[in-house]
Image (cartoon, rainbow, N blue to C red):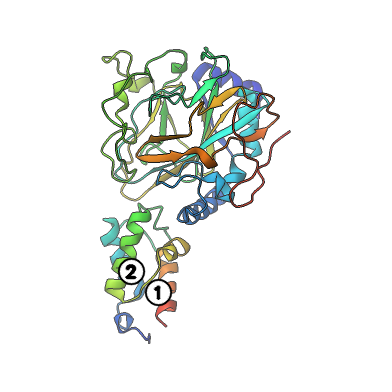
């Protein structure tokens, strides 16, 4: 995968990295790629923390509303790759 | 719907349900919309974190309060003429405490001033308000479903006029609270401090997304804790009265559950029949221009 963002250009996929971020922010890893962040314990305060962690670890700045529009790992990964292109 | 069965069950138990309002897929879609649109409070009538009355700025909720299935169930009990006087969010996040047992009639516990008052002055034996609690996620014993004490609406176990030590004037956050009743300790309102509700007699209301339960707040109710680590429970209530009940009588603002409520944009919404009493502020349109609809 080639991308303009060096933070995303490793063999460790965006989806895997995002799962790790979700685990850190939610405090558990009981979710799948199609689960909504808000169904598995997320809420608006934690959504802010999620955005900060994404920016810190993936170098991509997303508004919080993007979490609501792309609430699953699959959807958010696609959004992150779109935002970093 | 069997109106006679709804009435019989309700007047015996204090609640009726669960019954289906939406298909599960539709309920999940609605929840996604509600969550997203709740982030924008620019058109909300109250500027606080409590998410009361978001039907005035979220069209999906404006439509929900007049849902015909809900209206038919409420009419079976309260009659043809109905005002919706409040909607509220009830999320229960993984790890959250259960909501402690409580019993409410005039919604007086928060401030000491009744928020509901029948025109003829004194509440009688027949409940004059109803709550319809609709879940948009699964709601079961593990993730914090509601529970009721059947028949408890016929007796006063809690006295809302008691002045509590906790809650009034306090800050509160639904996400961070240590109390068992949204910033209050409802046990402080018990008529008999030594009385304990019987958990053995309790009915747990296990529900699927899109189902609702209808109850009078006079029926002692509460919820289980959410003991899961990954299943949020999310429900929304719509509360109804007949037009001869005064809502927020002589009040222009109040503080409760950590929020300040300025009533200048507030109004009840006629969802069925007619209002011949005109004792309440009423609104026919939301802040987005949505025209509230009325059945019949």
**Which chain is home to disc 2?**
A
Question: Please, what secondary structure does the residue beneath circle 1 have?
Answer: helix
Asked if the residue at tag 1 contacts the one at tag 2, i.e. Cβ–Cβ closer than 8 Å, the answer is yes
From the viewer's perspective, is residue B17 above or below residue B289?
Answer: above
Q: Residue furthest right?
A: B296
Q: Which residue is mark 2?
A: A18
From the viewer's perspective, is residue B154 above or below residue B170?
Answer: above
- Residue B237 seen in the figure: no
Residue sitting at x 54%, y 54%: B29
Quarter of the image with the C terminus of chain B in it: top right
- Residue B257 seen in the figure: yes
In whole angstroms, how far apart are the C-alphas of marks 2 and 1? 10 Å
Question: Please, what secondary structure does the residue beneath circle 2 have?
Answer: helix
Whether marks 2 and 1 lie on the same chain = yes
Task: Quadrant for residue B269, please give it.
Answer: top right
Task: Quadrant for residue B284, please give it.
Answer: top right
Image coordinates for residue B186, horizontal then vertical, percent: 32, 26
**Which chain is home to disc 1?**
A
Q: Which residue is mark 1?
A: A80
Nearer to the camera, B283 or B253? B253
Image coordinates for residue B171, horizontal then vertical, percent: 30, 40
- State which tag comes first along the sequence, 2 or 1: 2
Residue sitting at x 37%, y 38%: B144
């Amino acid at each position: 995968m080639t991308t303009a963002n060096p933070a995303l250009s490793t063999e460790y996929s965006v989806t895997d990295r995002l799962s790790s971020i979700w685990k850190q922010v939610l405090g558990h890893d009981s979710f799948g790629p199609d689960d909504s962040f808000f169904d598995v314990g997320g809420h608006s305060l934690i959504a802010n923390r999620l955005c900060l962690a994404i920016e810190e670890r993936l170098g991509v700045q997303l508004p919080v509303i993007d979490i609501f529009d792309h609430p699953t790992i699959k959807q958010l990964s696609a959004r992150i790759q779109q935002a970093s292109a | 719907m069997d109106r006679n069965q709804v009435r019989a069950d309700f007047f015996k138990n204090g609640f009726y349900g669960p019954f289906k309002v939406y298909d599960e897929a539709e309920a999940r879609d609605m929840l996604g919309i509600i969550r997203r649109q709740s982030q924008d409070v620019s058109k909300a009538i109250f500027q606080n974190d409590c998410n009361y009355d978001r039907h005035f700025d979220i069209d999906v909720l404006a439509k929900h309060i007049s849902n015909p299935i809900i209206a038919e169930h409420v009419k079976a009990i309260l009659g043809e003429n109905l005002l919706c006087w409040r909607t509220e969010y009830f999320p229960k996040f993984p790890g959250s405490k259960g909501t402690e047992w409580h019993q409410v009639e005039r919604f007086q516990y928060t401030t000491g001033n009744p928020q509901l008052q029948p025109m003829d002055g004194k509440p009688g034996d027949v409940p004059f308000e109803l709550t319809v609690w609709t879940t948009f996620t699964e709601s079961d014993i593990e993730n914090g479903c509601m529970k009721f004490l059947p028949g408890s609406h016929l007796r006063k176990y809690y006295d809302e006029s008691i002045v509590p030590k906790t809650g009034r004037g306090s800050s509160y956050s639904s996400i961070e609270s240590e109390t068992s009743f949204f910033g209050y300790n409802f046990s402080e309102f018990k008529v008999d401090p030594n009385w304990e509700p019987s958990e053995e007699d309790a009915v747990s209301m296990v529900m699927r997304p899109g189902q609702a339960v209808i109850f009078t707040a006079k029926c002692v109710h509460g919820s289980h804790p959410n003991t899961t680590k990954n299943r949020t429970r999310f429900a929304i209530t719509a509360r109804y009265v007949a037009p001869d009940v005064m809502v927020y009588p002589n009040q222009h603002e109040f503080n409760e559950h950590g929020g300040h409520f300025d009533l200048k944009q507030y109004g009840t919404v006629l969802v069925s029949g007619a209002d011949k009493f005109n004792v309440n502020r009423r609104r026919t349109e939301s802040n987005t221009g949505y025209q509230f609809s009325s059945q019949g």
